[in-house]
Amino acid sequence: MILIKSVFVEYPLDMTVHEFTLGKKCGRGTPVELLYHQPSGEGDAHYVDVKFDDGEKIRIFKPNEIEFLKVEV
């Protein structure tokens, strides 16, 4: 799991778009944690778990864009 800054996904079938950015309020609440999960094997999809300030969690499968946090060393 990798902590990320933002995630964007577009679903063309129902024409919805979701964008979640760490700490930026949206319609569902404020995302406090965005965790990227890499595929672990053949047929496995990558996904992002989004946790909101009210404790709600959602999972975004096959995101279109991911912005990783930059860590300075």
Image (tube, rainbow, N blue to C red):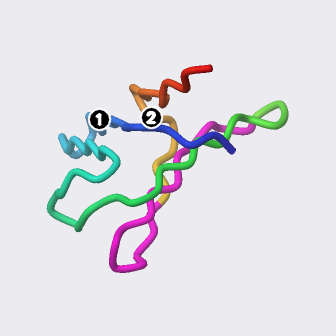
Position of residue 14 in the picture relative to residue 69 (left or right) = left
The answer to whether residue 38 is magenta is: no
Crowding at dot 1, Cα within 10 Å, few <14 / some 14-19 / many 20+, comes out as some
Q: What secondary structure is found at the residue carrying circle 2?
A: loop
Task: Give the x, y percent position of residue 59.
Answer: 49, 57
Tell which residue pokes out farthest to the top in this image.
73
Q: In the image, is 21 to the left or to the right of 16?
A: right
Residue range highlighted in magenta: 44-58
- Answer with mark 1 or mark 2, whichever residue precedes in sequence: 1
Residue 1, numbered circle: none
Q: Residue 32: horizontal and vertical position, in percent?
A: 39, 60
Marks 1 and 2, how far apart at CA: 8 Å
Q: Residues within 10 Å of mark 2 (few under 14, many from 20)?
A: some
Report which residue position mark 2 lands on.
63
Percent position of residue 57, x then y: 45, 69
Task: Check the image and report above or below for 27 versus 70.
Answer: below
Quickly name the residue at label 1.
Answer: 10
Q: Which residue appears at 40% of the width and 75% of the height?
A: 56
Residue at image position (30%, 39%) is 11
Task: Kindly identify the amino acid type of the residue bearing the numbered disc 1.
Answer: Glu
Q: Amino acid at mark 2?
A: Pro
